[in-house]
Image (cartoon, helix red, strand yellow):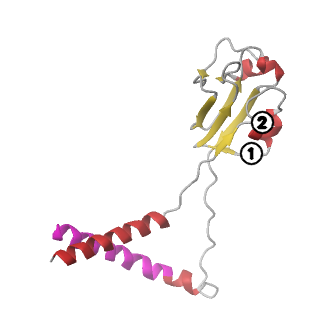
Amino acid sequence: MERSKVMMVVVVAAVAFALVVMVPQADATRYIVGANMGWTTNVNYTIWAQSKHFYNGDWLFFVYDRNQMNVLEVNKTDYESCNSDHPLHNWTTGAGRDVVPLNVTRHYYFISGKGFCYGGMKLAVRVENPPPPPTSSPLNEKSGSPSSMYRGRIVLPAVFAIGALWDAFVRVW
């Protein structure tokens, strides 16, 4: 009886692991602002951001001299005029290693106060929703590959098998 319980736990764990591995995941990206230069003067952050696509769920990682600079989120007008008097959010933690989650689909505007914005320390990014996953073409019986033809015949029985295993597992415990 004990051996069957152990085997059941192993089977359920294997099935759960397989399901987790098969579920597609969207990967968020953590961008180090300014790459190897970091958040500093004399870097054109507009050019740095041009080649990147920022998606909902990504992160910006600001690395800078904590004794001199800061990271302020401002509106577009304050971004354009380098006005740091009324930031929307002060992301400065004091460590010089600040992480900003890009969790809303919109434009974000960042500057460094204390006059550094005039030296180019300003960044504007547009955050979008991730693109949808690619869609498959309709299945044509003549051109369908064997794997795609059998997929429908495997998924439903697999779901029933997992349900039966779960039911057996619950009854044993």
| Residue that carries the numbered disc 2 in the rendered image | 37
- Please give the name of the residue rendered at 49% of the width and 79% of the height, measured from the top-left corner: 151
- Type of residue at label 1? Lys
Q: Is 39 in front, or is 75?
A: 39
Label 1's element?
Answer: loop
Q: Is 156 in front, or is 48?
A: 48
| Residue that carries the numbered disc 1 in the rendered image | 52
**Rendered view: 23 above or below 99:** below
Q: Is residue 132 left or right of residue 47?
A: left
- How many C-alpha atoms fall within 10 Å of the one at disc 2: few (<14), some, or many (≥20)? few
Predominant SS of the magenta segment: helix
Instruction: Specify the quadrant of the image occupied by residue 143.
Output: bottom right
Q: Is residue 7 left or right of residue 50?
A: left
Question: Could you tell me residue 80's position as x and y percent?
Answer: 78, 21
Question: Could you tell me residue 84's position as x and y percent?
Answer: 69, 15
Q: Quadrant of the C terminus?
A: bottom left
How far, Cα to Cα, is label 1 from label 2? 16 Å
Instruction: Specify the quadrant of the image occupied by residue 62.
Output: top right
Whether the magenta-drawn stretch holds residue 10 is answered as no
Q: Is residue 11 left or right of residue 104?
A: left
Question: Could you tell me residue 116's position as x and y percent?
Answer: 77, 19
Q: Quadrant of the N terminus?
A: bottom left
Residue span colored magenta: 151-173
Q: Is 96 in front, or is 17?
A: 96
